Image (cartoon, rainbow, N blue to C red):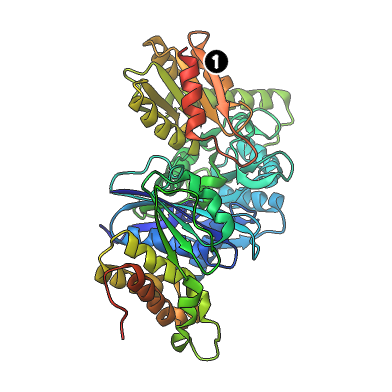
Amino acid sequence: MTDDRAFLKGNEALAYGALRTGLNAYFAYPITPSSEIPETLAAEFDRRSYPAFRTFLQAASELEAISMVIGAAATGAKAMTATSGPGFSLKQEGLSYAAGMELPMLIVDVNRAGPGLGNLGPEQSDYFQATRGGGHGGYPTIVLAPASVPEMAAFPALGFDLAFEYRTPVTVLADAFLGQLKEDLVLPDVAAPVYAPEWAATGARGATRHVLSSLHLELADQSRHSHHLREKRDRIAAREPRAEEFETDDAEVVFVAYGICARLARRAIRLLRARSVRAGLFRPITLAPFPADRLRRLVAAGRSKLLVVELNAGQMVDDVRLAAAGGADVRSVGEMGGLLPGSGDLVRAAEAMLR
Amino acid sequence: MKREMIVAGHGGQGVLELANWLAYFHFLEGRHVAYTPSYGPETRGGKVKCYVVASDEPIDSPIVEEPDLLVAMNIPSMDFVPLLRPGGTLLVNSSLVSDGPPRTDLRVERVPAAEIAAGLTRFLPEGARDASIAANSVMLGALFGVTGEDPDRARTAVDGLFRHFLTDRKAAYVPLNVHAVDAGLALLGRRPVPA
């Protein structure tokens, strides 16, 4: 047992994970069920316990908050914001600008239920918006999907690493369940401080001038830039997919699930195996880039029945079908509106695939 | 060891706190814990249901579908009785729930939590009047009793636990809550009521 062992909500753990990876600036526009992220950061900002954390600012709107993140990111700072539901839609414009300007930043979406205002329960219905990029224009997306409170704490470090390596926004796509769930965890180590990268607009006297802009009025300039972003997307797709497998070696049916649904699937797998049904789990950790090659290899190795579990009407199932390329029977099961599927629902759906 | 529990009641009874303290107790014992608060618009009288899973092994799903133990703080909480595993334990707040459960395969313990807590007025901070607010702590003690926690260990943990959670102006309520846990333990545990 270490001093860093803690018992925290997912949202609180994410805030501490961000602080421990050297967060410099947070721009808040709180919205349930993600509000514990700014609450925790505001309290720690007051305590001055993390010297790198220099700015906490409550904006007047979501658009203002994401625009402030753009400004801070342009100086090379580790800057982030978090939101839920309608707030994620409002921040898409800023994400598009940031991707066009090639700025690293972290945005957290604690997915709540329904289009419009919906409710405060968990859903995974922002999958398309996050993975495809809900802003205008075409740009690369990196989307990380934690499935536990320890991962909520660990993914800000991974997210900022990827954001700075590829100079693009990274989204942590959680859900209301993971945001509110409290679990034991060991907090990640405090990262060593880093200095502004060479492309940053630091305003230093006598330094090289850096122009960070998403405006390319000459068609050839925009074309060159768009091809560059496409090349970046392909590089990310080749190098960064992450997934976890559980009991897939002998599985006759494989759940494909991320986030809280992966946890539900693990229980269903235990129940199914107790009934002599060989079930397994394929869990995408990066939703973008989707771990398509790895899933394709699994299908090629004979795992030809895939059961996708999602808290939406079926979104990731499209990516699973694309990856399986007709080589597997792919079906979908899930819940919406803030409810979760029960183990019985998953067990029955898996058994139905084997009949 | 793996224990799956549901704590249910209504807003204002301290159900979220009770479940949080219970989870934190197991955390202090070095176990893996998962605590799922029910949340939403916070209203006095609204339905509250929490899941607490404590286990020596990593926890797969934090959702409790077949609890080993149900703490029913009010009548609507009895709706969860059918979920209890055969042989499971039902801890009823008999201050509000008079009927017995329609099952015979359970261990049922009835705890007049509000009345017991109301008897602890002498531990209230100055100016405060209603000790029955510590009914949730009485239930926590009773719960330690039925799950066979070592009373001394539980008492030490509870002391640290309340000092962790009851801070600032709530700190004055630590003695009341510690004695409320003691009273619950005394009712269902092995230890006599302290003098």
Q: Chain of mark 1?
A: A
Res B63 seen here: no
Kindly identify the residue that appears in the image at 61 percent across and 36 percent down: A99
Res A189 seen here: yes
Kindly identify the residue that appears in the image at 49 percent across and 65 percent down: B93
The residue that mark 1 highlights is A322
Quadrant position of residue B61 = top left
Which is more toward the observer, A45 or A232?
A45
Kindly identify the residue that appears in the image at 44 percent across and 46 percent down: B84
Kindly identify the residue that appears in the image at 61 percent across and 62 percent down: A57
Quadrant position of residue A94 = top right
Secondary structure, mark 1, is helix
Which is more toward the observer, B193 or A263?
B193
Q: Give the left or right position of residue A200, taking residue A5 as reference.
A: right
| Residue furthest bottom in the image | B126
Quadrant position of residue A295 = top left
Q: Amino acid at mark 1?
A: Leu
The percent coordinates of residue A318 (x first, y second) are 58, 20
The percent coordinates of residue B107 (x first, y second) are 38, 54
How many numbered discs, if any? 1
Which is more toward the observer, A121 or A145?
A121
Which is more toward the observer, B150 or A159?
B150
Considering only vertical position in the picture, is B52 above or below B170? above
The percent coordinates of residue B121 (x first, y second) are 48, 86
Callout 1 crowding tier (Cα within 10 Å): few <14, some 14–19, many ≥20 = few
Quarter holding the N terminus of chain A is bottom left
The percent coordinates of residue A173 (x first, y second) are 54, 40
